[in-house]
Each structure stands twice: as C-alpha cells, then as structure tokens.
Image (spheres, rainbow, N blue to C red):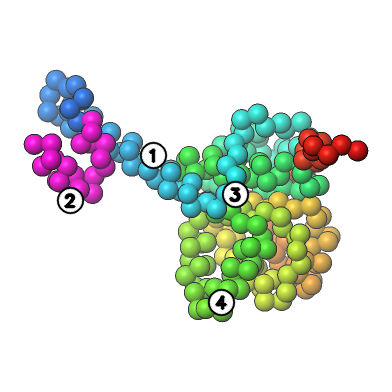
Amino acid sequence: MKELIAQYCKELRLGKSIVENYQKIQAETNEEFLLKLLKLEIENRRVSRKNRYLKQTNFEVMKTFEGYSFENVQIPKSITLEELQEGRFLEKKENLILYGPVGTGKTHMATAIGIAACNREKKVRFYRTATLVNELVEAKSNGTLKRFLKTLRKTDLLICDEWGYIPLDREGAQLLFQVIAERYERNSVIITTNLEFSKWNGIFYDEKLTSAIIDRLIHHCHLLVFTGKSYRLEHSSIKA
C-alpha cells in the first residue's frame, strides 16, 4: 500500500513528506485527515521553495541579523528598523543605498536582508557589481543577453555589492543602466558603495548616463549611512 501511495504521489508531483508522515496524522473524519494532509504538503512546498531561492541567491557567505550591531548605522526616518529587517520595502518596489567606508557592515546587512526576503518567499540575486557587468557583457557576446535580463527581471530583489569599486567601460555601463532602468518601479535594488553620488561619474564616464542611473535609483529609495572603523581591521590578527 505504501509503495502504491508513493507511486501516486510521484505521478502527481507531491512531496515525499506525504508518504513519510500520512500514517502519523490523527483525525476523526476523512475531511479532517485530508485537510491536515494538504496543510502538510503546502508547508513542505514552502520549505522547498525557500531553500531553492536561497541556493539561487549567489551569496558568498550566508549572514543574518543575529548579533548585528546598528550602532554605527544612520537609518533615515523614511523607514523603520523593523521594515528594514523584514524587507517590507520590497512590497513598495523601493531601493536601498548602503553608503559608507569599507568594512563597516554594508554587505553583511544587504545579505541579511536578502536572506530574510528569501524566507518570505522572495526571489533574490546577489552580485558584486563588477561580476554582474562581466556576465552581462559575456551574455551579450554569446547571444544570451535577452535570457539573462529576463532572469534578472524576475527577481524581487537585486543586490549590487561594491558598486563603484571598479570603473566600467562604455558597454558595461550601458548594460548596467539597462538593468537598473528595467527595475525602476517594478522591483527593488540594494546597492552597497563607498562613493558619494558626486563621484559616480568616475564609474560611468558619462554625465547623462550617470544622472539617469542616479535619478532612477533615488526616486523611491532609502539612504543608509555607515560610519565607524572597518570591522576587519579592528579584528585583524595583524596588530600595529
């Protein structure tokens, strides 16, 4: 009987949890049993979906808000700490710009927000900005750019880490602008950077393109300013 149930579950693309747990379900009526069985399958699919989304993020290191210090982070009045941690700004298609010196926790926060979003069944992609641009240029050269852009459009949150660390050539800058423009008022972006807006022209080398990118990013945006010393330097094993 159990083998037959497993076969039917496979044909119906139902989770293994039904086969493994249906005998443990206690119910007084057939309707109650069916209800509990369906709830079990829904929960199993949610967990599978969350795990799948986490695997697709490209996070280099998984980090959460557990133990995270906000002491040296200036959070604007336009967003609360709770809204930030829970990623509620995604529902409003808003962006975050995390600005401050190297090593002050910007990437950690962006990652933690991304993981929290995945746990709420949101699709997230994390890229070092230079890596994203390289993949865009490569996709254009091999004829897969349209497919790559479609994948990016489907994400609820795109995280561009280390924005401005490496200057871009004209083609890379135009492709990055296309990504940002397509997400405007549709999906959210998080950018981590150590460059103020006045220096962004040094990334793109085109005033009009720079202005267009800034205009789209900051229209619906919260700017978080990070201060203090580099965590890595503070906890380095090399002492002066």
Q: Residue at x 60, y 60 (%)?
A: 184
Quick one: label 1, few (<14), some, or many (20+) residues within 10 Å?
some
* Tag 3 and tag 4, C-beta contact below 8 Å: no
Residue in the picture at 26% in, 42% down: 15
- Looking at marks 2 and 1 on the same chain, the residue that comes earlier in the sequence is marked by 2
Q: Mark 3 to mark 4: distance in Å?
A: 25 Å
Question: Which residue in the rendered view is the most extreme toward the right?
Answer: 240
Q: Farthest front residue? A: 238
The answer to whether mark 1 and mark 3 are in CB contact below 8 A is no
Q: Secondary structure at mark 4?
A: helix
Q: Which mark is residue 11?
A: 2
Q: Quadrant of the N terminus?
A: top left
Q: Which residue is mark 4?
A: 140
Q: Looking at the picture, how far across and down is residue 32, in whole percent? A: 18, 26
Residue at image mark 3: 60
Label 2 to label 1: alpha-carbon separation = 21 Å
- The quadrant of the rendering that contains the C terminus is top right
Q: CA distance from mark 1 to mark 3?
A: 21 Å
Q: Residues within 10 Å of mark 2 (few under 14, many from 20)?
A: few
Residue type for callout 1: Val
The percent position of residue 99, horizontal first and vertical second, equals 76, 48
Which structural element holds mark 3?
A: loop
Is 232 placed left or right of 132 in the picture?
A: right
- For this rendering, which residue is in front, 63 or 118? 63
Is residue 80 located in the magenta-colored stretch of the structure?
no
Bounds of the magenta span? 1-21
Distance from Cα at disc 2 to Cα at disc 3: 36 Å
Q: As drawn, which residue projects farthest toward the left?
A: 1
Identify the mark nearer the N-term, 1 or 4.
Answer: 1
Residue 183 located left or right of residue 4: right
Three-letter code, disc 3: Glu
Please give the residue where the numbered disc 1 appears in the rendered image: 47
